[in-house]
Image: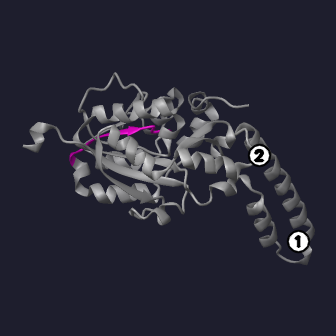
C-alpha cells in the first residue's frame, strides 16, 4: 500500500521519529561555514523543518528564524520540543501565501523535502521560495541524485550476499549467523520484489537507465519504507531548473560536506546539496 507524503508525515509515529533526531548533516555544517558571520544578520526560513532537527543548530545563529512544514503533526512536534523559543508555522512551499515577497535572506529545505513533490509542484516550490527570498538571498536544499553509482544496488541482492559472507564470526556462531542471513535474504528479496512491483519494472537497471536519459523521474526506493515515490534528478537537470526559476551562483556539496563541482565525486552518494542565490534586481545592480 502506498500513500501520499503529507499523510505519512502527519502520522504520530513519523512525527515522533523526526522530533527525536538531533544532528546536522556534514553538508549542512558546510553551509553554516560558507555563510559564516552573515547568518547573524539573516532572516531564515527553515522549510520542511520536520521535527526540528535543524532548529537547534541554525536558529541561534540567525537574526530571525521561522520553521515551517506542511504537516501539522511536524509543527506540533516542534512546538512541543522548543516551546516559545522559536517561531513555527504550518506552510506549504508550493504556495506560501502567508509569507510576503522578499521577506527572507536564507531558505533551507533539508532532508530532500522537495523530492516529495511532483515535477510541476517542484517547479512551483522553486518559484515560491525565490519569491519570498530577498534579491541576493541564499537557498540551500538537498535532492536525490539520479546518477548515484549505488542506485541500482538498492534493488539487488548483492549487498545482502556481501553482508552474509562478512558476518561469519566463528564456528559456535555459524548456525545463528546462517539463520540470520537466511532471514535477511528473504526480507531483502521480498523488499526488492515489492519495490519492483511499485516501480512497474523487474529490470530496475534498465528502468534507472531510462530515467537517466530523461534526467529526472520517480522511484519507489527505501525512503519511508517504500511507501511513497521519490523524485530523483541529475545535477545538470537541477541546474537547469534553478536557472529557469531565477537562481544563480549555484554550487554543489557532497553529503559528506565536501564542496565540489566534480561529477565523479558527487555521484558517489545518493544525495546532492545545492547552494544558490536569487538574482539581484536592477536597482541593486546599479
In the displayed structure, does residue 273 sit left or right of residue 134? right
| Viewer-side residue, 156 vs 181 | 156
Number of numbered discs visible in the structure rendering:
2
| Viewer-side residue, 160 vs 197 | 197
Q: What residue would you read off at disc 2?
A: 202
In the displayed structure, does residue 143 sit left or right of residue 61? right
Residue at 38% x, 45% y is: 240
Residue 59 seen from this side: yes
Residue at 45% x, 34% y is: 122
SS of the residue under disc 1: helix
Q: Is residue 168 magenta?
A: no
x and y, in percent, of residue 270 in the image: 55, 55
x and y, in percent, of residue 143 in the image: 49, 47
| Viewer-side residue, 151 vs 30 | 151
Q: Nearer the viewer, mark 1 or mark 2?
A: 2
**Compared with residue 156, is residue 220 higher up or lower down, i.e. above or below?**
above
**How far is disc 1 from disc 2 in space, using C-alphas?**
35 Å
Q: Quadrant of residue 1?
A: top right
Quadrant containing the C terminus in the rendered view: top left
Q: Which mark is residue 173?
A: 1
**Compared with residue 142, is residue 81 higher up or lower down, i.e. above or below?**
above
Instruction: Categorize mark 1 by other alpha carbons within 10 Å: few (<14), some (14-19), many (20+).
Output: few
| Viewer-side residue, 270 vs 92 | 270
In the displayed structure, does residue 209 sit left or right of residue 97? right
Residue at 91% x, 75% y is: 172
**The magenta segment:** 41-50
Amino acid at each position: 500500500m502506498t500513500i501520499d507524503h503529507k499523510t505519512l508525515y502527519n502520522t504520530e509515529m513519523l512525527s515522533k521519529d523526526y522530533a527525536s533526531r538531533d544532528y546536522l548533516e556534514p553538508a549542512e555544517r558546510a553551509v553554516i561555514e560558507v555563510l559564516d558571520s552573515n547568518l547573524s544578520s539573516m532572516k531564515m526560513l527553515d522549510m520542511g523543518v520536520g521535527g526540528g532537527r535543524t532548529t537547534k543548530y541554525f536558529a541561534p545563529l540567525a537574526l530571525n528564524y521561522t520553521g515551517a512544514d506542511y504537516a501539522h503533526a511536524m509543527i506540533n512536534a516542534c512546538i512541543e520540543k522548543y516551546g516559545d523559543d522559536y517561531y513555527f508555522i504550518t506552510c506549504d512551499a508550493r504556495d506560501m501565501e502567508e509569507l510576503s515577497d522578499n521577506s527572507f535572506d536564507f531558505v533551507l529545505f533539508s532532508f530532500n523535502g522537495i523530492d516529495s513533490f511532483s515535477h510541476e509542484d517542484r517547479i512551483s516550490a522553486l518559484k515560491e521560495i525565490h519569491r519570498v527570498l530577498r534579491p541576493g538571498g541564499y537557498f540551500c536544499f538537498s535532492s536525490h541524485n539520479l546518477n548515484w553509482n549505488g542506485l541500482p544496488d538498492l534493488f539487488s541482492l548483492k549487498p545482502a550476499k556481501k553482508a552474509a559472507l562478512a558476518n561469519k564470526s566463528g564456528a559456535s556462531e555459524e548456525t545463528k549467523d546462517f539463520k540470520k542471513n537466511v532471514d535477511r535474504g528473504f526480507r531483502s528479496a521480498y523488499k526488492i520484489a515489492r519495490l519492483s512491483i511499485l516501480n512497474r519494472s523487474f529490470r530496475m537497471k534498465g528502468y534507472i537507465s531510462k530515467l537517466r536519459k530523461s534526467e529526472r523521474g520517480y522511484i519507489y526506493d527505501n525512503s519511508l519504507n517504500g511507501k511513497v515515490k521519490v523524485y530523483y534528478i541529475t545535477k545538470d537537470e537541477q541546474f537547469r531548473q534553478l536557472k529557469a526559476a531565477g537562481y544563480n551562483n549555484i554550487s554543489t556539496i557532497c553529503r559528506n560536506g565536501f564542496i565540489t563541482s566534480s561529477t565523479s565525486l558527487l555521484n558517489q552518494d545518493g544525495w546532492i546539496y545545492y547552494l544558490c542565490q536569487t538574482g539581484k534586481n536592477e536597482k541593486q545592480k546599479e
